[in-house]
């Protein structure tokens, strides 16, 4: 490792299977303290050009391998990352802020994701077979995939994209969020020991670096996970050479509680679905619609849980919720809370911003809030949940759908048939009954409306990393 790399705390880019230090560096802040705890190498245009060249060199051999061979290599990748899980979790808790238990859970998903994705068969499909013509639909890798990942689930999301890109025969360049680059860079070093050189290149950088990737003619597809505004910029940047794009963007997920449930029975799973990772999950419940007949009971059941949660530095094993990940997001959620108070909404639990050194906010339950409030119309992406009253299910569905987002939604009921009927009316990519929207590698995941473009995971997602080709075979006349 170079002297520069040591000066940066040992974090390096991985390009063509080698550790590469950056000349410049940027600060990485621990959100639990608000202080810089590490320096990260910053990728340059020259680094990107080297990564693209390495990925293009590696592509022909990697793409020519069988699915079985690539599956075996990816299994070794998953095993290596899992072996380093405790080190990665220790880095992740400092840069992301979630609890150490949540960090370990994120790392524990690596092997499962890889195993499930690489168990899916992607072969030729026969569209027609007659004596005069045989028609097949074949799939071939695209080439080089650029992967841009967010700060809320850095490793879990990266691994899902890596597995899809590499299993389908592509090579890849991965850029993590500049807020949480370090665990991903370390994972790149781990990967270099088991993947052929150039197959996976991992580089850190800011928004400019992401723009260079999006527009680069040597990258054939971009998989982006992040905000709606940035997703629109990615799509515009990719238009120059019509590169393929998959966008998994934000959500303002509704959940509708029907009138046949006991609020105390559903409060715990609903709370978890709203407040895991400090509410910083794209598929978290962000609007909860509750019948008027049980409204106060539901608000109080959720409030009891919120009041019992210990907040603090996620590295403390006794903490139940860590900080908001970065100052910009903290100020945004703080502004939404201030708007909520100005409108006269009722804070049932939480609402405080404890002075613990970092970007902390108490888990907050809000009642009696209008539909046009920022907390209801926007995606807060923080530990604050509005509970909205309804008297008619049709009206609840209409209000749930009255948004530009459409990632996921859920219905909570003892009547599964009725629940499925109501869930099917939600204008979302994933509609669930008695659970809420966390993706599974075996099922397609993505959003309707402005919550995304295309799908990740499942055979449908894998095929989006490949080019479809119709093959017509006819005998000579």
Image (tube, grey):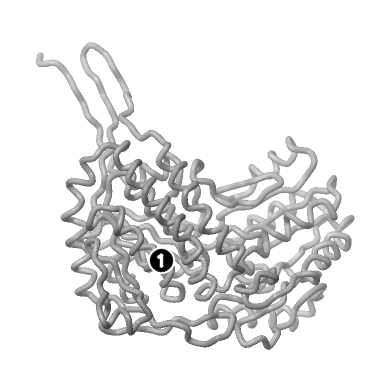
Residue 182 in the figure: left or right of residue 203: right
User: Horizontal placement of 316 versus 476: left or right?
Assistant: right
Give SS at disc 1: helix
Q: Can residue 443 be seen by looking at this rendering? A: yes
- Where does residue 255 sit, x and y in percent of width and height? 70, 55
Percent x, y of residue 414: 80, 41
Q: In which quarter of the image is the N terminus?
A: bottom left
Q: In this view, does 118 lie above or below 103?
A: above
Name the residue at 59% across, 69% down: 98
Question: Crowding near pointer 1: few (<14 within 10 Å), some, many (20+)?
Answer: many
Q: Residue at x 36, y 61 (%)?
A: 190
178 above or below 191?
below
Q: What residue sits 80% from the left and 76% below the top?
A: 347
Quadrant into which the C terminus falls: top left
Q: How many marks?
A: 1
**Residue bearing the label numbered 1:** 184
Residue at the image point whose x is 28% and y is 62% from the top: 201
Left or right side of 42 for 156: right
Quarter-of-image position of residue 233? bottom left
**Residue 258 appears at what percent x and percent y?**
79, 48
**Is there any visible trace of residue 235 in the rendered image?**
no
Q: In this view, does 321 lie above or below 192?
A: below
- Along the viewing direction, whichever of 143 and 354 lies nearer the viewer: 354
Residue 412 at x, y percent in the picture: 75, 48
Residue 330 horizontal side relative to residue 399, left or right? left
Q: Nearer the viewer, residue 52 or 348?
A: 52
Residue that sits furthest to the left in the current view: 476
Residue situated in front as seen by the camera: 130 or 90: 90
């Amino acid at each position: 490792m170079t002297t520069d790399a040591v000066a940066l705390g040992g974090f390096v880019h991985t390009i063509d299977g080698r550790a590469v230090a950056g000349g410049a560096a940027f600060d990485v802040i621990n959100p639990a303290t608000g202080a810089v705890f590490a320096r990260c190498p910053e990728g340059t245009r020259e680094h990107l050009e080297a990564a693209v060249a390495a990925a293009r060199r590696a592509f022909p051999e990697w793409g020519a391998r069988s699915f079985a061979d690539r599956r075996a290599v990816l299994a070794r990748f998953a095993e290596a990352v899992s072996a380093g899980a405790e080190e990665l979790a220790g880095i992740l808790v400092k840069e992301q802020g979630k609890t150490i238990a949540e960090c370990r859970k994120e790392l524990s998903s690596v092997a499962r994701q890889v195993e499930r994705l690489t168990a899916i068969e992607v072969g030729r499909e026969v569209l027609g077979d007659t004596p005069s013509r045989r028609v097949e639909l074949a799939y071939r890798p695209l080439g080089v995939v650029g992967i841009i990942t967010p700060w809320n689930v850095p490793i879990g999301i990266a691994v899902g994209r890596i597995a899809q890109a590499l299993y389908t025969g592509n090579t890849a360049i991965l850029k993590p969020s500049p807020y949480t680059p370090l665990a991903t860079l370390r994972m790149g070093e781990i990967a270099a020991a088991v993947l052929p050189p150039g197959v996976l290149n991992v580089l850190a950088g800011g928004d400019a670096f992401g723009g260079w990737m999006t527009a680069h003619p040597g990258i054939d597809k971009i998989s982006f996970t992040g905000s709606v505004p940035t997703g629109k910029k990615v799509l515009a940047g990719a238009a120059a050479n019509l590169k393929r794009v998959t966008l998994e963007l934000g959500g303002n997920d509704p959940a509708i509680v029907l009138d046949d449930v006991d609020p105390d029975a559903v409060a715990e799973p609903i709370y978890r679905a709203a407040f895991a990772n400090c509410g910083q999950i794209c598929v978290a419940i962000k609007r909860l619609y509750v019948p008027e007949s049980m409204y106060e009971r539901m608000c109080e059941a959720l409030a009891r849980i919120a009041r019992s949660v210990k907040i603090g530095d996620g590295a403390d094993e006794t903490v139940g919720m860590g900080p908001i990940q970065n100052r910009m997001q903290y100020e945004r959620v703080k502004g939404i809370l201030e708007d909520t108070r100005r409108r006269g909404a009722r804070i049932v639990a939480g609402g405080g911003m404890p002075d613990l050194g970092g970007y902390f906010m108490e888990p907050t339950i809000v009642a009696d809030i209008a539909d046009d409030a920022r907390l209801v119309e926007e995606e807060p992406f923080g530990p604050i949940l509005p509970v909205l009253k309804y008297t008619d299910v049709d009206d609840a569905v209409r209000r749930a759908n009255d948004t530009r987002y459409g990632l996921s939604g859920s219905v909570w009921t003892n009547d599964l048939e009725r629940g499925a009927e109501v869930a099917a009316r939600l204008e979302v990519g994933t509609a669930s009954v008695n659970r809420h929207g966390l993706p599974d590698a075996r099922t397609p995941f993505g959003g309707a409306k402005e919550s995304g473009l295309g799908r990740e995971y499942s055979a449908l997602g894998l095929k989006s990393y490949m080019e479809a080709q119709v093959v017509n075979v006819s005998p000579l006349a």
